[in-house]
Amino acid sequence: AVAAFAAVLVSTPSSIMVDAKFVTGTLTLEANKAQILSKFCFDFQKDCAPHNCSEESVPGHMGYSLTGARRLDGEPITTKPYPEVFVAMLDDEYFSFPEVSQIWEQANCSEVKRASKRWYPINWEEASGPHGLTVDKTNVVEHLRPRWWYFAIATCAPYGLTMQYRLHMENPLQSWQRELSMDVVGVGWISALLAAAFIVVALVQLRSALQWSQASLSMKGNLEDSQSKRGRYRRILLLHPAVLLLTFASVASAAGECSWFFYYWDLIDGSADWNNWQLVARATRLAGKTCLSILMMLLSRGQCVCTPDIAWEENREVVGGLVVFGLAAFGLETWGDSLVNTSTTEYVYDTRPGTILVAFDLVWFWLYVSRAFATWQAETRIKPRTFYMMYGFPCSLWFLALPSVAFLATYLAPWVRFKVTYILAGLTHWLTLSVLIHTFRPHVASGLYELSLHEYHAVRTDELDQLIKDDDFI
């Protein structure tokens, strides 16, 4: 069952950002139109003015190169007049990009030029020549706050054009983080701390799983095999599904955070593999969160708490719903990743598709709370009621993480939004995982759960208590 859930991706807060230092691609321009190539959040310097700033104090640089420029219909352009083409730079002040973006599809080159804070004509002979056109560095100066800048290419020609482009943006005042957009500066350190925290809880859970495994072997009298390292890892796969779900969740979550760490540090180093790290990070972290959510839904029904077994058949609707919901969320976040080089700075869960998923997440919260409350009311034994009062109901906040972060994101400035949502999502994940790992430690689980079904080789409560007293596996 765990293997089937490994590919499921559950909805969690995840922010979309522009953090790559290079943007490359092929541009197709319609006649008398413009197209956004990318956006980037630049640093600011209070002591600088647009035309009065020393080279050491310039907060932002932008460079570009254009090659293979030609008419879209393939007709050669060998004589003057050459087409009027220019690079437009617009920022997030209302009278610049926000204003023209409302009519961007209908805007012509003159309207884009008027909205631009600055624009640079493109030498067509160079851009269409064998070596292309290269501008190594253009200063971008801001003195009030970090600001989003949008880079577009516009043509005033009555025919379509195509060309290859390469943009390079950087924040030189940020030293070794100069290649990062200001909305993600510092996230490398945050990802390192989160990765370390998740590794710690994953190791704690692995130790607990090995303790459960050793106790199972001791019950069967195979003490020699219980001392074998190979035997421990082989027998861990025969433990209770709840323990396996939690173990997979902890390992996958740790792998995900480590991958995010490699992703951001590869961005700083300019590695070509950063997109691969992003894919691995998203898949493994969300797979871990999926197992965590499924386990919590099972606990709300009294599985492992009131009864030792997990009735998968009775819970297939919930598990199937989480699968569909998670796949939809993964599709949304993947779509959000594709927006990094577009004009939007909106948090992906505040878009129209995102708000639908947020609404469904509130449904999961209601299902968890209502089922946990019904189970708590039906139970008369102290142990199950203790679990729900101490851990079950507080853990319901896990299903409010996404709606809360999405709501907060609407009030955050876009240049700080990603860091805040990244920290909140990571901490919520880590705290929830840590609480469940604590409850499934053998000496704690004996007072909260029923994990004594023999087919899973789990230890009975009375025997587990005796093992603890004898220090057989601590």
Image: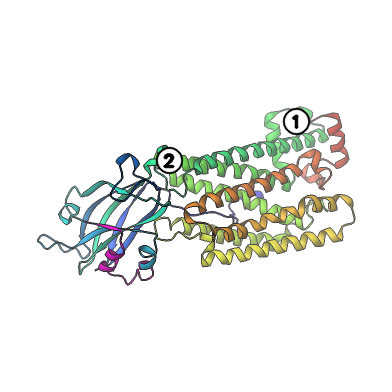
The answer to whether residue 76 is above or below residue 392 is: below
Q: Nearer the viewer, residue 76 or 422?
A: 422
Q: Relative to 137, is 450 on the left or the right?
A: right
Residue 297, visible in the rendered structure: yes
Residue shown at the point (56%, 65%) measured from the top left: 355
Pointer 1 residue:
226
The answer to whether residue 155 is above or below residue 38 is: below
| Quadrant assignment, res 360 | bottom right
Is 115 in the magenta?
yes
Marks 1/2: CA–CA distance? 49 Å
Q: What stretch is highlighted in magenta?
A: 100-121
* Tag in front: 1 or 2: 2
Residue shown at the point (86%, 61%) measured from the top left: 378
Q: Relative to 104, is 364 on the left or the right?
A: right
What type is the residue that disc 2 sits on? Gln
Residue 310, visible in the rendered structure: no
Residue 312, given in percent of the width and then of the height, sits at: 73, 57
Residue 223, given in percent of the width and then of the height, sits at: 79, 29
Residue 103, given in percent of the width and then of the height, sits at: 36, 71
Q: Quarter holding the C terminus?
A: top right
Q: Indicate the secondary structure of the residue bearing disc 1.
A: helix
The answer to whether residue 222 is above or below residue 423 is: above
Pointer 2 residue:
177
The answer to whether residue 152 is above or below residue 222 is: below
Residue shown at the point (55%, 51%) measured from the top left: 420
Q: Sequence-wise, which precedes: disc 1 or disc 2? A: 2
Is 247 in the magenta?
no
Q: Indicate the secondary structure of the residue bearing disc 2.
A: helix
Residue 402, given in percent of the width and then of the height, sits at: 61, 58
Circle 1 crowding by C-alpha within 10 Å: few under 14, some 14–19, many from 20 = many
Q: Residue 323 carries which label?
A: none
What type is the residue that disc 1 sits on? Ser
